[in-house]
Amino acid sequence: MRDFHLPGRSTVHALNGMAATSHPLASLTAIDTLRAGGNAVDAALAAAFVLGLAEPQMTGIGGDCFILLKPAGTEDVIALNGSGRAPKGLSAEALRAGGHDRMPLHGVHTVTLPGAIDAFCRLHADHGRLDWDRLLAPAIACAEEGVPVAPRTAFDWAADLPVLQGRAREIYSLSGRAPRVGEVFRNPLQAEVLRRIAREGRRGFYEGEVAEDMIASLRALGGSHTLDDLAATACDYTRPLSGTYGGLELLEHPPNGQGATAILLLNILKNFDLAALAPLGAQRAHLEAEAAKLAYDARDRFIADPAPRLDHMLDQSTADALARLIDPDRAMADPAPLAEAVHKDTVYLTVVDRDRMAVSLIYSIFWGFGSGLASDRFGINFQNRGAGFTLTPGHPNEAGPGKRPMHTIIPGMIRENGRVTMPFGVMGGAYQPTGHARFVSNLADYGMDPQAAIDAPRCFAGPEGLEVERGYSVGTREALARMGHSLSIPAIPLGGAQAILIGQDGGLTGASDPRKDGCALGY
């Protein structure tokens, strides 16, 4: 139990349904949808569309998604890959010939086709209950009437504003500046797109005037994208990956997402008795950092479309061999900068309904405001997910026509003794596998409740050294420095998370990260 003298959040408890998202309006939308007779899929989709208006720097209809779904009446979990592909005209050789040694971060060459809407439509057709008019009404109202900008959103918006170019800057700024906290952001152009999806489903986005607007705009900017590329966008149902730690089974979305990295990281940490260490002490942080360096090195070698040697990456003997490389008293060198881009901008949400259908959904345009570009007529902000490719010749993740890049976004679920007990996710780009492993360890090694597991201070070993949030003590920092870690305080907190615990007694417990603007709500 937390110390009620100190700032913090209580877990949220309910019996019928629960939603946890990164914005209060989205959480409320999900609960309203459940109470109107919708199921968890309906509620998650309605909330996701609202997040595209409430946090447009993080996500939107020009982006991608990954989903884990536990249908009602079963403990099996389905994975749905809603990541779009590169256009058929993308050529790594041409980019190298043009002077690029790595994928550009922004601009038209980083734009992959939007996959989220195709996945949303497929999920709704296969598992939804309410019609599109009902599900899209809250987002349409947000687009037309506006959304008051929340504090964390305003902070990120100001930092991401310089990326916006041309039409995107006109739409996603207020006379050229970022909105301040409490100012209202409207996007009536997007309301029109949502109405077309409500009327026509997938066709309203991937065909007709909306599709023509996207492709004509990209072509005018020098892109090779075609209407055929867009029409060919198709999500895939797949099987989740699975790993165990401390009696918990961690389910992750398979590649091209990086979820396998979290399983490998936990497999490495099995070699150490973390439960005997202080949860916020230097020794635990050191071991986690060293394990992450090794797990991420494997990620950068193997996670791609398709992913070679995935079985080897997930084999416990591989993790055991890597664990033997860790010096418990001394930090190894910081990892080299990646050949592809990873960043921290996304939204994650989870919903559980009264029939215990559970949805774990992550939805993103990659970097803040994606490519920085938008379509001329409808103002659809294009993602820059193509920056997740590498230009290294022969690499599995080398940019190529029709390929999906390595993706940072990963939804998670936990299963115990064959029963799904918790959909969860940790936002934060490259941090996400470490965030998943840290969350699972907080539960399994230290017996934290979901909110405490989310609230606890975080650290992350990356190319810039060991980022350590201010929640760690001076003593822990000094001990880490003595071990050879190069420490820094991150400019923004590491990630953001949501989780819902499905209790053995039928109760629901929701948790939401105070690092973001969101909340958990139940009824």
Image (cartoon, grey):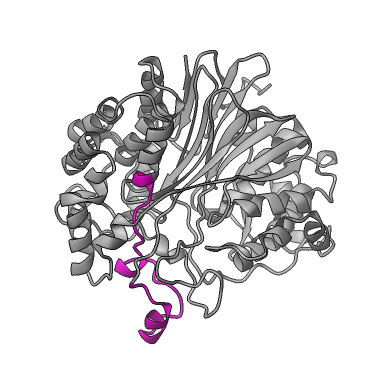
Q: Would residue 174 appear left or right of 16 to someone viewing this image?
A: left
Q: Would residue 279 appear left or right of 420 to someone viewing this image?
A: right
Q: Position of residue 204 (x, y in %)?
A: 22, 44
Q: Is 404 located above or below residue 267 in the figure?
A: below
Q: Which residue sits at x=39%, y=40%?
A: 122
Q: Position of residue 497 (x, y in %)?
A: 54, 38
From the image, give the main secondary structure of the stretch colored magenta.
Answer: loop
Q: Is residue 378 visible?
A: no
Name which quarter of the figure residue 203 lies in.
top left
Q: Which residue sits at x=31%, y=28%?
A: 135
Q: Which residues are magenta?
A: 89-118
Q: Would residue 126 appear left or right of 281 to someone viewing this image?
A: left
Q: Is 461 located above or below residue 82 in the figure?
A: below
Name which quarter of the figure residue 416 lies in.
top right
Q: How many marks?
A: 0
Q: Position of residue 463 (x, y in %)?
A: 59, 66
Q: Position of residue 63 (x, y in %)?
A: 36, 51
Q: Is residue 305 visible?
A: yes
Q: Is 309 located above or below residue 78 in the figure?
A: below
* Residue 95 painted magenta: yes
* Residue 447 painted magenta: no
Name which quarter of the figure residue 335 lies in.
bottom right
Which quarter of the image is occupied by the N terminus? top right
